[in-house]
Amino acid sequence: MEKSFETAIVHNSLINTSNIHSKTTPIYQTSAFTFQSLEALEEFYQGNIPYLYSRTGNPNTDELGQAVARLEGAPDGVATSSGLSAILAGILAVASAGDHIVAADDIYGGTHHLLKHELKELGIETTFIPFKDASMIRKAIQSNTKLLYSETVTNPFLRIENVTELVRIAKEFQLCTMVDNTFATPYLLQPFIDGVDIVAHSATKYIGGHSDVTAGVIVGTETLMAKARQKVVNLGTNLSPFEAWLTSRGLKTLALRMERQATNAQLLAESLTNHSNVKRVYYPENLSTKGNGAIVTIELGEAVDIHQFFSSLGWVKLVPTLAGVETTVSYPFGTSHRSLTLEEQESIGINQWVIRISVGIEDSADIIKQFKRAIEAAL
Ligand SMILES: *Cc1c(COP(=O)(O)O)cnc(C)c1O
């Protein structure tokens, strides 16, 4: 039967794809999946056909979740629409109304807000305390506590969490542990292998690596990931197929990028350490055998005019994110930590001279030159 123009234009899709073997995973840019028959639909519900509707599952998002899970040494992983929605899904897999969380007080601002305001409104309370001191963690645990929450490396001062100690305390009180491993990535640290139940990533950062997607991933035990997946499906915080595909593509070069960026960061940190107009350099030591990460935070001397410094950085752009292949700077005083009072900022070490540097893959000598020149120009 001949189709009319109007019908043909809609029903234009190719072909039988079973003989096409593309080298990379195609983008399954589809909201749903078709079924040949009612029997095939039944097969889906029996678990023999994987996909029905993209919010409930899509090959590209599954590919990303599974890839990060493998790199973290975890049995399962779920990709979501952002780092924050990954963290939300992970928390809701463990806690519900009436439960309590103990969280480190120096976690990412967005996560702090999620716990302090959004989850509080939903009946989940959080106590924030300095995790430097294990006795304070123990003291904060209540009879309804379900979760200890922290980050493997914190922002912007790069405190390294004592994951082993956290897991030990959690076991003692039969709690779950969840850590955000965004800054370290599984290239440097694998907290699931150290006993953490859920590991979260803002894949917007190093996993994607190219500043072109917003995405998140959580990995963990099969039971917890099954629960988290249900939250993502029911809250509608799934990742789009195209963004999952871009993130999976970025992930392929994670090891190369991190190796290079961490080496560059180490060299930059060393070159600024005894600089007469740099008051402090924050850079982790002994983070992992493969390097200390690619973020360097500095506090410039008071002789440096901060406006002049930022406008003298040339190709190093001011941008409120991190982890791309380009070296960038961010300004905690004016962005991530601006809502804190001056006393709060002071107590954690933030002031107008603190700069967070996300070191890229450029030539290290060029990066160092760029910062030394900008400091010079701002005196
Ligand atoms: C950026 C970031 C997040 C939030 O991720 P989004 O992708 O922006 O939702 C969470 N944790 C850390 C450590 C981050 O740097």
Image (tube, rainbow, N blue to C red):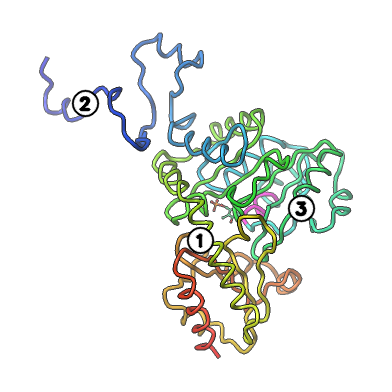
Q: Is residue 238 left or right of residue 300?
A: left
Kindly report the distance in space between the C-alpha atoms of the residues bearing marks 1 and 2: 48 Å
Write down the residue under mark 3. 162
Which residue: 71% across, 61% down?
A: 159
Q: Is residue 376 left or right of residue 98?
A: left
Write down the residue under mark 2. 11
Q: Is residue 326 above or below residue 52?
A: below
- Label 3 or label 1, whichever comes before in sequence order: 3
Q: Which mark is residue 260?
A: 1
Q: Is residue 224 above or below residue 299?
A: above
- Label 1 or label 2, whichever comes before in sequence order: 2
**Which three-letter amino acid code belongs to the residue tagged 3?**
Asn
The residue sitting at the front extreme is 289
Secondary structure under the numbered disc 3 in the rendered image: loop
Which residue: 42% across, 74% down?
A: 315
* Main secondary structure found in the magenta portion: helix
Secondary structure under the numbered disc 2 in the rendered image: loop
Which class describes the residues within 10 Å of circle 2: few (<14), some (14-19), or many (20+)?
Answer: few
Q: What is the x, y in percent for residue 193?
A: 68, 40
Q: What is the x, y in percent for residue 358?
A: 54, 65
- Quadrant assignment for the N terminus: top left
Kindly report the distance in space between the C-alpha atoms of the residues bearing marks 3 and 1: 26 Å
Magenta residues, start to end: 110-115
